[in-house]
Image (spheres, helix red, strand yellow):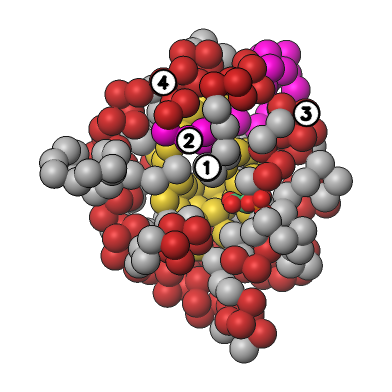
């Protein structure tokens, strides 16, 4: 498939007080200086920091994203944030269906799909996460598990500009473990074919990120794997130094 512009997205999860904002400013400066090569950068801080982060990144090559959204534009949903609110705060991306939300907040594929529709409605690019558990991989079920998540989570109306897929094996998140390059290549090839079935002709245009224990010392090997169009990075995105070392492989 043709090479797509790589995307390196940082997921800060529930980490970061205002005192962490200089990490974002330093990332912007490094990216403006060419430190991320040809990669596009996105930082997804906690919602409390989105407005400040977006103000810092304005005019820089770094975009800001949310970590989840509600499917409705507004309403009686205490504690939730809509895609329109993320957009209004300065975000242009949103992570959806992260395994920590699928397991910790009981999010299923249908809910992820509705949220992706909300993201499109608000003009955000959705980063839809999929990935198998350790038990599913050991049972030989990794591909069908991810295939079912994709079919269930991706709206039929998706346009390639508005959608990014992140393959994040649950057992690789925050564990220091990663699949072999062979297994990542097999899964990414499978995901691309599935997208093409679901959204005819778009499989070669949608970026498929790898996520799960991407660090400065394994990023170069992982970026070289076929069909890996960038990374979704958790722990390695919290400091400017590690995040730029990872993005710098591009
Ligand atoms: C993630 O949660 O999206 C992730 C990839 O985490 P980590 O890089 O810390 O494994």
Say which residue label 1 marks.
Answer: 14
Describe the element under mark 2 as helix, strand or loop. loop
Crowd band around label 3 with a 10 angstrom C-alpha radius: few (<14), some (14–19), many (20+): some
Tell me which numbered mark, 2 or 3, is placed earlier along the sequence: 2
Residue shown at 44% from the left, 58% from the top: 101
Nearest-to-viewer mark from 1 and 4? 1
Q: Which residue does the numbered mark 3 point to in the structure image?
A: 241
Quadrant where the C terminus sits is top right
First in sequence: mark 4 vs mark 3: 4
x, y percent for residue 25: 62, 16
Residue 102 can be seen in this image: yes
How far apart are the two marked residues, 1 and 4, measured between alpha carbons?
16 Å
- Whether the residues at callouts 1 and 2 have beta carbons within 8 Å, the answer is yes
- The residue wearing badge 4 is 51
Residue 6 location, x and y as percent? 63, 39
Task: Kindly identify which residue carries mark 2.
Answer: 46
Q: Secondary structure at mark 4?
A: helix
Work out whether residue 121 or residue 244 is closer to the camera in this orientation and state it: 244
Q: Residues within 10 Å of mark 4 (few under 14, many from 20)?
A: some
Q: Secondary structure at mark 3?
A: helix
Give the mark, 2 or 4, whose residue is nearer the N terminus: 2
With 97 as the anchor, is 28 left or right in this view?
Answer: right
């Amino acid at each position: 498939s043709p090479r797509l512009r790589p995307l390196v997205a940082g997921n800060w999860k529930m980490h970061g007080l205002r005192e962490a904002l200089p990490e974002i400013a330093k990332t912007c400066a490094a990216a403006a200086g060419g430190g991320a090569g040809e990669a596009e950068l996105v930082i997804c801080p906690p919602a409390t920091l989105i407005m400040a982060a977006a103000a810092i990144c304005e005019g820089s090559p770094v975009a800001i994203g949310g970590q989840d959204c509600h499917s409705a534009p507004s309403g009686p949903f205490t504690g939730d944030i809509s895609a329109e609110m993320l957009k209004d705060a300065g975000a242009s991306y949103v992570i959806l269906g992260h395994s920590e939300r699928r397991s910790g907040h009981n999010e299923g594929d249908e809910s992820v799909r509705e949220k992706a529709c909300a993201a499109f409605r608000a003009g955000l690019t959705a980063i839809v996460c999929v990935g198998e558990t350790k038990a599913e991989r050991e049972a030989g079920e990794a591909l069908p598990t991810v295939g079912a998540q994709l079919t269930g989570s991706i709206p039929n109306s998706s346009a390639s500009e508005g959608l990014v897929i992140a393959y994040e094996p649950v057992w690789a998140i925050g564990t220091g473990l990663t699949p072999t390059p062979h297994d990542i290549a097999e899964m990414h090839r499978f995901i691309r074919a599935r997208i093409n079935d679901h959204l005819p002709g778009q499989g070669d245009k949608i970026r498929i990120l790898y996520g799960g224990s991407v660090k400065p010392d394994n990023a170069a090997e992982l970026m070289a794997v076929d069909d890996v169009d960038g990374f979704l990075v958790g722990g390695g995105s919290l400091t400017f130094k590690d995040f730029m070392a990872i993005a710098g492989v591009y």
